[in-house]
Amino acid sequence: ARAAAQVVQIDRETTYESGAPVYNSLSRLSISQQRLALPVYKARRQFLYLVEKYQVVVVVGETGSGKTTQLPQYLVEAGWSCGGGKQVGCTQPRRVAATSVATRVAEEMSCNLGTKVGYSIRFDEMASEETVIKYLTDGMLLRECMVDPLLTRYSVIMIDEAHERSLHTDVILGLLKKILSKRSDLRVVVSSATINAQDIKDFFETNRTRDEKKDSCRIMSIEGRTYPVDVHYLVEPVSDYNEAAVQTVLDIHRTQPEGDVLVFLTGQEEIDRVVLSLQDRGDSRLRVLPMYSGLSADKLPLVFEAPPARTRKVIVATNIAETSITIDGIVYVVDCGFAKIRAYNARLGIETLVVQAISQATAKQRAGRAGRNRAGKCYRLFTEEDFHRLTPLPVPEMQRTNLTPVVLCLKSMGIDNILHFDFMTPPPVGNLIRSLEILYSLGALDNDAKLTTPVGTTMAEFPVDPYMAKIVSSVYNPPLLTLPQLLSSGEEYKCSEEVLTIAAMLSVQTVWSFTYEQRHNADGARRKFAVYEGDHLTLLNVYNSFLAKNKNRDWCKSNFMNYRALIRAMDVRNQLKKYLKRWRVPVVSTTNSSNITKCILSGYFANVARLQPDGSYRTLRSNQSLYIHPISVLNNSNPEWVLYHEVVQTNKVYMREVTTIDSAWLSVIAPQFYEVNTKSSQHMRSLEEKEDVNETASVFSPAPNDGALLSLSS
Ligand code: ADP
Ligand code: MG
């Protein structure tokens, strides 16, 4: 207990605003009363007027004021969906936000999900002809744009959480700017935090090529009541913020008046551990719940439920609770000061998940979650000095991520001049060039930096990342073969059955499910399925065993597998299989495991690493030092050459999903990459020049490849 006191020792305390209203949770009101009580309701008329009059409306308002759930409903009530059966679409940067908000709005409109209100996320769609409001991830809207470049099925598109500056949202903003000039009937609503509103307005109003400005956008602010939040810092930094979080929550529970707690940590593993620890050490009046995007759909609704009387709810969450999901009743926020974000090093060609310090803006947003219902408190698990060292604003994802999928997508829309695309914040040119280079090595772009038919077009359409798309779509279909060397050596993989499974398994969140305490037993169970070659084939083995056991839930449980994830993998697999059917790719099976590995290598040739004398690995391309993740079945066997699916960075840079390869395959499977490196970079320079020449190309002047894409998808 003494340690706990130390952790939450505070060095600054302000007094409550006098007469702070008593805690009044919205959830005690009926649903229609709740709707009328939201701050956004007072702005309803003004909002509808602005949408009528201006093509773009930027809405600024506190989290929880009702933007996401209410604005699409207002639009439908005002008739924006009528005539021609058009939809109101609302994008979300996160899958969970799309499904959870759609569920809520369906409830508010008293209809079943998938009827008037629907959602669409990758591999999962609940929408129909009847749907007038559709919540979808920004990535899905981008995919729809590939098939329907003018987004004709929408009358209004709301880009929610634009301040998050997610990669797909940024790309869509660029596309919408073009679409608006072709569709005067379309309306765009952008919801954003205050700091970005003016930038967004400027972006839509400025014509960069012609140096003119039009008056087509308005900013609207929603007046929301927020209460003061006392911010407390640590006096001394701590080495383990997880333990500090546990102690702080227990301390709040012991010393503070009623009110729920929201704890921000960085990822599932940490969250599970802290939840367990709190359940262990807290009393029966503490109701602790996890919240992260991999959480099974049946557990998520629990976080919205009011806790039983005299019980304190504690939600331990990732940054999904920052803005996209609002939980009522939070009075205390505990902020570890970190978040897990995707980072990309274009020079090294490595994408990692890194735990990084958040920005000041993010820390303020997190603290704000405590002041929605009454004055609250925020405990930052770092010192005030550290706070002032944080960067003021988060870096847009566009600046720090692998752009290959997006470049492929833009190319497939006929936007050939990617280096000059109108991005709100253009990404580093080096990242774009690196992506062009990878797509060229994959055979998706030709010498003129144009999308190839059918390899490039097929890859673009496939709903998995380009490397995976390459292995699933192109290798075993003779007309799609891009590797003449393989043909001539008479190699044929004939393993589409197996690769479909592996692609599906890699596309779902982890298939293993165990708590921190069970980790040793789980490890033993996992070893039962381990395949000598590595994790890819192990996943295949797991999936096939699951089917052999008739998809038995109990069997999953006793083997520490996530039943729902496996069912989802089945779903994903069926969808991928439909694509193969459409392209008349035979679905065939092999018993030769090296065929499967070669096939995977044909897509992931860039992710190859070699064992070093000290037991670490180095990537072949860039000499980056890597380690095999402890969860990998190859963890202790240290083969000389491996390929990996992805890299995560925690205390070390780890390769996840690792498979042994034969180094002799490299020059056969990816000669463009491993042998003629210098030639290829010369070639890329000329590609860049060609990009520059393609100045006139635009989304809507169909590129030669567009036709092929459309005929494939029809
Ligand atoms: P904003 O988008 O402005 O942040 P929202 O429209 O998301 O606001 O939230 C408005 C209200 O709806 C909040 O009080 C929130 O608690 C409630 N709400 C949102 N989603 C759900 C849900 N799935 N279950 C219960 N309440 C919800
Ligand atoms: Mg919202």
Image (tube, rainbow, N blue to C red):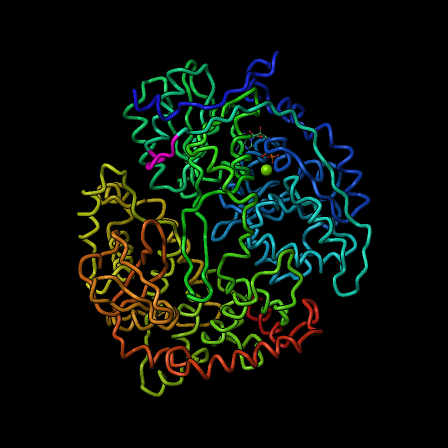
Q: Is residue 97 visible?
A: yes
SS majority, magenta: loop
Q: Which part of the image, by quadrant, shows the N terminus?
A: top left
Q: Where residue 530 sits: x, y (%)?
A: 20, 57
Instruction: Report which quarter residue 580 is drawn in.
Output: bottom left
Q: Which part of the image, by quadrant, shows the C terminus?
A: bottom right
Tell me, yes or no, whether the highlighted magenta stretch contains residue 241. Answer: yes
Instruction: Report which quarter residue 639 is drawn in.
Output: bottom left
Q: Relative to the observer, which residue lies in front, 514 or 551?
A: 514
335 lies above or below 664: above
Q: Where residue 430 sits: x, y (%)?
A: 53, 67
Q: Relative to the observer, which residue lies in front, 8 or 503?
A: 8
- What residue is drawn where x is 51% and y is 45%? 94
Q: Where residue 596 sits: x, y (%)?
A: 30, 69
Q: Where residue 693 sits: x, y (%)?
A: 66, 78
207 lies above or below 603: above
- What residue is drawn where x is 40% and y is 40%? 295
- What residue is drawn where x is 71% and y is 44%? 81
Stretch in magenta: 236-242
